[in-house]
């Protein structure tokens, strides 16, 4: 079976570099066909393999998608995702979208695109985090309203969006399991003289510091006890491997919208 041809969007970023490096380790499964990054990136026209810290791959980093690979993996920025989404629909390229910070309009565009191409969108492509999502839903459902729910997430000091997409997914899992409306239940931080916790809310707190890859803790607390469900990523390879696994999944799927739960059979 021929290897799956890939385009990596956000190729010069932290995730992009690891995706390229790990794909290069599996030439029987993946072939890099295109590497995309912002027009102003200092990595423009450099070999994607060299930028990723592996042997040259003969694929220069470019601002334009000039080939038609089977799958595009996107860990970039919302504006770049919008452009790539339209190109993938036009060329019938399947997508794995890991970009966070997308708007409601973006989600509608992804829904529409999924009518003609296979798209897997995930706020986190790591296996452990996706198991955590299921555990959080189960705990919220079984513990019920007697337990306060608080979420703390920590990332490196260069991350732009807050809270993280993963933290929002964890909050949505807890809210859905307990029949809460996420928009009204979610409380982002607390301050001031009237910050008393309101029953039924889900607290969300974001920390930005140093080079933290990603830490997420969900607390369920009531009088006399507390449960903590926590995931700590020590490097980005867990996310990159998950994204490559997702790419192999959508490469053989019919048009539709998929999640990591589909990939992992959860």
Image: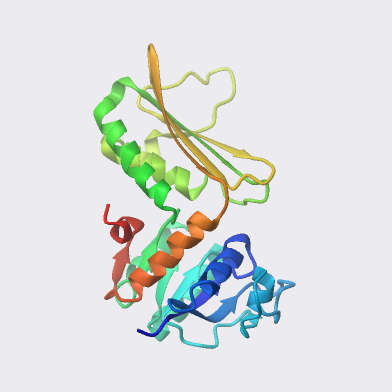
Residue ID at (51%, 77%): 7
**Measuring 42% from the left and 47% from the top, which residue is drawn there?**
129
Q: Is residue 142 left or right of residue 33?
A: left
Q: Position of residue 85 (x, y in %)?
A: 45, 74
Residue at far right of view: 42
**Coloration of the structure image:** rainbow
**Left or right: 175 as drawn, with respect to 14:** left
**Farthest-out residue, top:** 224
Q: Is residue 114 above or below residue 196?
A: below
Q: Is residue 85 visible?
A: no
Where in the figure is residue 136, as x and y percent of width and height?
34, 37
User: Can you say which quadrant of the picture contains the N terminus?
Assistant: bottom left
| Residue 95 x, y percent position in the rendering | 41, 72
In this view, the residue farthest toward the bottom is 67
Relative depth, front residue between 84 and 118:
118
Please tell me whether residue 88 is drawn above or below residue 225 in the rendered image.
below
Near-viewer residue (110 or 251): 251
How many marks the image carries: the answer is: 0
Seen at 34% across and 42% down, the residue is: 173
**Quadrant housing residue 256:** bottom left
In the depicted view, which residue is nearer to us: 65 or 266? Answer: 266
Q: Residue at x 38, y 16 (%)?
A: 225
Residue 42: horizontal and vertical position, in percent? 74, 72
Drawn side of residue 192 relative to residue 248, left or right: right
In the rendered image, is residue 81 in sight?
A: yes
36 relative to 79, above or below: below
The residue lying toward the viewer, choosing from 115 and 221, is: 221
């Amino acid at each position: 079976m021929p290897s799956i041809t890939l385009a990596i969007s956000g190729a010069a970023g932290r995730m992009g570099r690891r995706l390229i490096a790990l794909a290069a380790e599996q030439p029987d499964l993946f072939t890099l066909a295109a590497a995309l990054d912002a027009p102003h990136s200092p990595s423009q026209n450099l070999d994607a393999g060299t930028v990723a810290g592996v042997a040259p791959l003969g694929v220069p980093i470019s601002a334009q998608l000039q080939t038609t690979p089977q799958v595009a993996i996107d860990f970039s920025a919302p504006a770049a995702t919008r452009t790539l989404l339209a190109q993938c629909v036009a060329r019938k390229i399947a997508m794995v979208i890991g970009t966070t910070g997308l708007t409601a309009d973006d989600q509608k565009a992804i829904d529409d695109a999924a009518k003609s191409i296979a798209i897997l969108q995930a706020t986190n492509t790591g296996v452990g985090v996706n198991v955590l999502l299921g555990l959080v839903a189960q705990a919220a459902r079984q513990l019920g309203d007697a337990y306060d729910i608080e979420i703390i997430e920590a990332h490196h000091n260069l991350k732009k969006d807050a809270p993280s997409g993963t933290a929002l997914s964890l909050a949505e899992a807890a809210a859905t399991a307990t029949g809460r409306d996420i928009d009204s239940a979610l409380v982002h931080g607390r301050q001031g003289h009237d910050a008393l916790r309101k029953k039924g809310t889900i607290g969300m707190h974001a920390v930005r510091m140093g080079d933290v890859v990603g830490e997420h803790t969900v607390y369920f607390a009531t009088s006399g006890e507390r449960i903590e469900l926590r995931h700590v990523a020590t490097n980005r390879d867990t996310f990159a491997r998950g994204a490559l696994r997702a790419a192999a999944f959508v490469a053989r799927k019919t048009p539709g919208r998929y999640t990591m739960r589909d990939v992992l059979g959860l």
